[in-house]
């Protein structure tokens, strides 16, 4: 194998130029004249394998480092998120607690206002009932008094009318009795006068005297009543 062929093979194995590849190229360009081509190839392969293993190890270390950094970053992000979540949760709990406290206070205030309103309403209702009872009692007392006064006046009026009626009835009866007595005395007086005239004038016939008696009765009826000496009317 020529030097140029060996150089090309090393480049193909290593996949492109690099500081390590350039070192290998120099090593290949200046081999010892005593080494055979197979020994050179073995050295190149050994060097390539070692270089590859170093690259793999370096890549693994870089991957581990990146993974560790990513893991650390992820954990930090998780911790930050958890911390932020805890802060938010605490704030939410405080807000919820404040809301509960405010709601409880509002409920207590509302209950207090409702109790006060109920107490005032009951007090007003009690006063209204008391006034209504007093007004009803006063109205009933006034009605009873008015009814009593009306009954008393009625009894007084009826009693007065009855007394007046009895008095008038007695006066009527007295007047009727006086009229009867007066007519009887007048008739007797007229008859006595006619008899006296008949005695003085005997020529007057008895028929004329009897004919004049109805006229005497009519005259007594037509006469108005007069007061007697006893003071009766």
Image: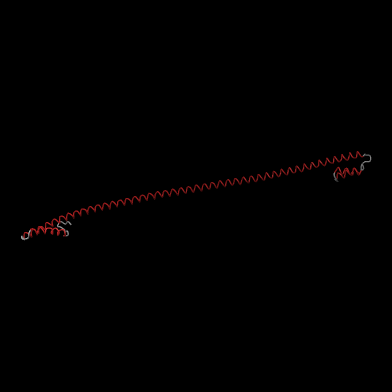
Q: How many marks?
A: 0
Q: Is residue 144 above or below residue 215?
A: above
Among the 4 quarters of the image, the one containing residue 86: top right
Among the 4 quarters of the image, the one containing residue 23: top right
The spot of residue 31 in percent (x, y) is 92, 42
Q: Going by the picture, which residue comes out furthest to the front? A: 207
Please tell me which residue lies in front, 207 or 48: 207
Q: How is the image coloured?
A: secondary structure
In the picture, which quadrant includes the C terminus?
Answer: bottom left
Q: Relative to residue 192, is residue 125 drawn left or right?
A: right
Please tell me which residue lies in front, 166 or 42: 166
Q: Relative to residue 199, is residue 21 drawn left or right?
A: right
Q: Relative to residue 228, is residue 31 drawn left or right?
A: right
The spot of residue 55 in percent (x, y) is 82, 42
The spot of residue 219 in percent (x, y) is 14, 60
The spot of residue 214 in percent (x, y) is 13, 58
Please tell me which residue lies in front, 42 or 197: 197
Q: Is residue 144 above or below residue 37?
A: below
In the picture, which quadrant includes the N terminus?
Answer: top right
């Amino acid at each position: 194998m020529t030097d140029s062929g060996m150089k090309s093979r090393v480049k193909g194995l290593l996949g492109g130029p690099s500081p390590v590849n350039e070192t290998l190229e120099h090593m290949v360009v200046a081999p010892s004249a005593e080494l055979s081509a197979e020994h050179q190839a073995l050295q190149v392969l050994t060097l390539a394998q070692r270089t590859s293993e170093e690259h793999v190890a370096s890549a693994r270390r870089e991957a581990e480092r990146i993974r560790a950094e990513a893991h650390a970053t992820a954990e930090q992000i998780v911790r930050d998120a958890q911390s932020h979540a805890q802060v938010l949760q605490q704030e939410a709990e405080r807000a919820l607690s404040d809301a509960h406290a405010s709601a409880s206070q509002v409920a207590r205030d509302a209950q207090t206002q409702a109790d006060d309103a109920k107490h005032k309403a009951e007090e007003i209702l009690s006063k209204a009932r008391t006034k209504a009872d007093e007004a009803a009692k006063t109205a009933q007392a006034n009605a009873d008094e008015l009814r009593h006064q009306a009954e008393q006046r009625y009894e007084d009026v009826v009693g007065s009318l009855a007394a007046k009626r009895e008095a008038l009835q007695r006066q009527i009866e007295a007047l009727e009795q006086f009229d009867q007595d007066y007519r009887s005395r007048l008739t007797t007086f007229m008859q006595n006068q006619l008899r006296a005239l008949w005695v003085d004038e005997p020529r007057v016939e008895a028929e004329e005297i009897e004919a004049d008696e109805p006229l005497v009765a009519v005259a007594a009826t037509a006469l108005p009543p007069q007061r007697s000496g006893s003071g009766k009317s």
